[in-house]
Amino acid sequence: MPDSNYDVVIIGAGNAAFSAAHAAVEQGSKVLMLERAPEEEYGGNSRFTAGIIRFAFDGADDIKRLVPDLTKEQLAKTDFGTYTEDQFYDDMFRVTSFRTDPLMCETLVGGSKEAMFWLGERGIKFVPIYGRQAFEIDGIFKFWGGLALESWGGGEGLVDQHRGIAIKEGVEIVYGARVYELIYDGHVVSGVRFKRNNKLEEVKAKAVVIAAGGFQANSEMRTRYLGPGWELSKVRGTRFNTGDGIKMALDIGAMPFGNWSGCHAVGWELNAPEYGDLAVGDQFQKHSYPFGVMVNADGERFVDEGADFRNYTYAKYGRAILGQPQQLCWQIFDQKVRPQIRDEYDIRQVTKVTANTLEELVEKLEGVDPVQCLKTLKEYNTAVNTDIPYNPNVLDGRCTEGLEINKTNWANTLDEPPYEAWATTCGITFTFGGLRVSEAGQVMDVDMAPIPGLYAAGELVGGIFYFNYPGGSGLISGAVFGKLAGTSAGQAASS
């Protein structure tokens, strides 16, 4: 049993929740974390990620500060480039169709580098993303898409590092505790009520931080807010993010905010389980599509696979796949691009076919019209402008011409067998709609006044992402707003 005397109670145990815990401890707070999942499944969606984190940096010196073990030899053959705050702002506004809330975006972007250094100082380790975000061309690894680092050990390594630090800080973590209600007297939040081991309990606190994720694992809420058909999507991550944190705040008059009909959704293994599998992690994802083509059940292409770097399209193409007949597509590649295909394509738990001719391949694509598919692939091959050089490290402009949906970059003819194809559906990561928070991370009510004692961070903070998402922004958002909410909650508890 947790004791009844805490300064700050945090709901959740993912990246945002732990960031809030570290920040609250820095303010001298006694902290309790209540995690709905059992201990073997703790970590929220963060545990299912690859651990990639987007942040503003000014060059190799910033990277070296975060990865002090980088050798001179590694630095000599690596072009990290820069990713300035202006570039981060440009990406946020561009991919959200200029709908991201300016103040929220300013907090996120302006606090991103500071949050990374802060995490590093706490003891979180990072490594460069060689292979997935940098291909070796002429002996140099050139990073692209604004991403350079991931947490050591991926998402699982991130939350394990967080937990180890929190335990050393004296944070108490209770697993299997489903918080279902805020203790609220109409003026101030003073604790929570939760269910554990089939018993109802409550704990008082001077401040509460909700960091319990979105509603992506709740099929009813997905269908209600995202629209018809979303009950058919797979869930990439934890089965425990069912919107409880959002609902308990709305129940006391919190203001809904953001893109409630929007979400982060990607290409995902067709026959993956209903929810994320910790043994597989994020390896069901299918993110190499920019170097191949995608065809639906009608045998037709339906998106520009090379519209932009994968970082800027993958989070919206899941929705595009869900909208196709039978909610599926096949991603097709030949051997020219095999070195660029990511490692997750080669795990055992995939639905894959191989063939030595396109005629043989289309007959193996289950659920696909083979006649139309062969016609589509041959028309695509004819349309590729082979005069433009292919370069996977840049937007190379190697395109198709004359198709109803042209491919803008990385268009290669399919003519080097064996051909390989992977069956793909939609995997939802997290939802964009959530709670409105102040510049201090405090939850706002429907009259736009802060609710005393209540703070929020992570996926359930609305107003940041609309329609789409720059890759790696979720974890940095959790760190920035977690640090903000934890600091403010700790300060409020000590005042």
Image: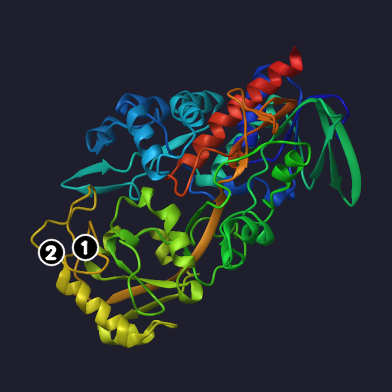
List x then y, in percent, for residue 181. Answer: 82, 41
Characterize the local packing of mark 1: few (<14), some (14-19) or many (20 or more) Cα atoms within 10 angstroms. Answer: many
List x then y, in percent, for residue 250. Answer: 73, 41
Q: Mark 1 or mark 2, which has the lower sequence index?
A: 2
Amino acid type, mark 2: Asn
- Residue topped by disc 1: 411
Residue farthest to the left?
387
Q: Is residue 445 left or right of residue 140?
A: right
Q: How is the image coloured?
A: rainbow
Q: Is residue 384 left or right of residue 450?
A: left
| Residue 480, visible in the rendered structure | yes
User: Of 202 and 88, which appears nearest the observer?
Assistant: 88
Q: Measuring 62% from the left and 30% from the top, which residue is drawn there?
A: 437
Q: Measuring 55% from the left and 40% from the top, which residue is drawn there?
A: 158
Q: Is residue 89 above or below residue 259?
A: above
User: Of 342 and 374, which appears nearest the observer?
Assistant: 374
Res. 258 image quadrant: top right
Q: Is residue 256 left or right of residue 281?
A: right
List x then y, in percent, for residue 245. Answer: 71, 43
In space, the residues marked 1 and 2 are separated at their CA atoms by 8 Å
Characterize the local packing of mark 2: few (<14), some (14-19) or many (20 or more) Cα atoms within 10 angstroms. Answer: some
Res. 492 image quadrant: top right
Q: Measuring 22% from the left and 69% from the top, which residue is drawn there?
A: 403
Res. 222 image quadrant: bottom right
Q: Is residue 51 above or below residue 55?
A: below
**Which quadrant does the N terminus fall into?**
top right
For mark 1, give the secondary structure: loop
Amino acid type, mark 1: Ala
> In the drawing, what numbered circle is on residue 218?
none
> In the drawing, what numbered circle is on residue 385?
2
| Residue 356, visible in the rendered structure | no
**Which quadrant does the C terminus fall into?**
top right
